[in-house]
Amino acid sequence: MSVDGNSLPRIGHGFRLQWEEVQQAHVLLYPEGMVKLNPSAGHILTRCDGATPVRDIVADLEKCFDTSALSADVEAFLELAHRQRWVEM
C-alpha cells in the first residue's frame, strides 16, 4: 500500500492509542501486548482519526513544530505503521 496526501489513516482494528504516564510516552495497546512509541510516532498517530488526510496531518505537524518538508517522513512512517497493522487506510 502506498500512502499519499489523500490517504485517511486511522488506528488499526484491535489497537488502542493512549498516553501512558508511567512510560512518559504514547503507546499502542493490543490484546497481546503494548508498543511504546517514540515522540514522533506518537505525534503522528494521535492525528490519525480516519477523517484527516495525510496532507493535513503533515501541515499540522509542520505548523506545531515550526518546520517544513515532513511529508516524505510522515508518509514513510505511515507505510511502516500500515505494514504493522497499527493503522488502516
Image: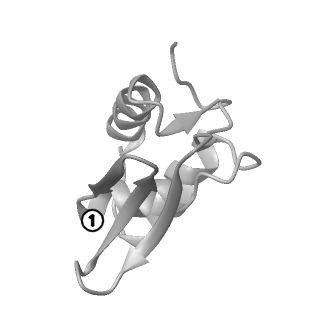
Residue 66, position as x, y percentages in the image: 36, 69
- The residue carrying pointer 1 sits among few (fewer than 14), some (14 to 19) or many (20 or more) residues within 10 Å by Cα, namely few
Q: Nearer the viewer, residue 22 or 44?
A: 22
Q: Please state if 43 lies on the left or on the right of 39 as rendered.
A: right
Q: For this rendering, which residue is in front, 18 or 2?
A: 18
Q: Which residue is mark 1?
A: 39
For this orientation, the residue located farthest to the front is 32
Residue 45 place in picture, x, y as percent? 48, 54
Residue 40 higher or lower than 54, as above or below: below
Name the foreground residue: 25 vs 72.
Answer: 25
- Which residue is pictured at 68% across the width and 42% down the height? 53
Indicate the amino acid at tag 1.
Answer: Pro
Closer to the camera in the image, 37 or 62: 37
**Residue at x 77%, y 48% (from the top left corner):** 51
Q: Is residue 89 left or right of residue 67?
A: right
Question: Which quarter of the figure has residue 43?
Answer: bottom left
Give left or right: position of 77 versus 4.
left
Rendering coords of residue 14 (x, y %) = 57, 44
Colour scheme in use: one colour
> Which residue lies at the image location 30% right of the left edge and 58% below the top edge?
40
Instruction: Establish if 20 lies above or below 42.
Output: below
Q: Where is residue 21 shown, x and y percent of the image?
A: 32, 87
Rendered image quadrant of residue 72: top left
Say what secondary structure mark 1 lies in.
helix
Q: Which residue is drawn at the image coordinates 45% and 61% (left, top)?
A: 61
